[in-house]
Image: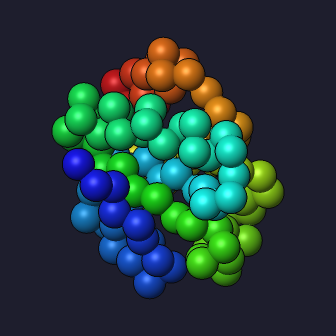
Amino acid sequence: MEIKHISQNEYESILKDHKFVVIDFFADWCGPCQMLSPIINKLVEKHKDIYFCKVNVDQENGLALGLGIASIPTLIFYKDRKPINTIQGYRPLEEIELIIKKTFN
């Protein structure tokens, strides 16, 4: 399944339309971002109740800066429109699974 790439214009509506959201802030040139991508794809398939999306920080610099994204990859976990958890850098599948369990259960 293809993960939707969102723009600053879509950001608020995504949070409003979904109870659980994970946004992956990335760049095409970022090695750790590329390593994280297949893990995110596995999570999308497993967690149908969570809306996963991506923001390319080179294309959506204003959104990234506005949210204080200082390094990539960064994952922000939202519950009921509020950021509940943030992780930076590459993390293995098992660690992200634990964060999902703690954040959304």
Is 15 displayed left or right of 82 in the figure?
A: left
Tell me if residue 102 comes above or below residue 79 in the rendering. Answer: above
Q: Position of residue 51 (x, y in %)?
A: 30, 50
* Residue 8 can be seen, yes or no: yes
Tell me if residue 17 comes above or below residue 19 in the rendering. Answer: below
**How many badges with numbers are in the image?**
0
Residue 89: name its quadrant: top right
Is 67 displayed left or right of 56 in the figure?
A: right
Q: Nearer the viewer, residue 24 or 80?
A: 24
Residue drawn at 44 percent across, 84 percent down: 9
Q: Position of residue 54 (x, y in %)?
A: 46, 59
Q: Position of residue 26 (x, y in %)?
A: 60, 56
Q: Nearer the viewer, residue 2 or 61?
A: 2
Residue 32: name its quadrant: top right
Residue drawn at 65 percent across, 33 percent down: 90
Tell me if residue 42 comes above or below residue 73 in the rendering. Answer: above
Residue 5: name its quadrant: bottom left
Residue, far bottom: 9
Q: Nearer the viewer, residue 104 or 41?
A: 41
Is 27 displayed left or right of 6 in the figure?
A: right
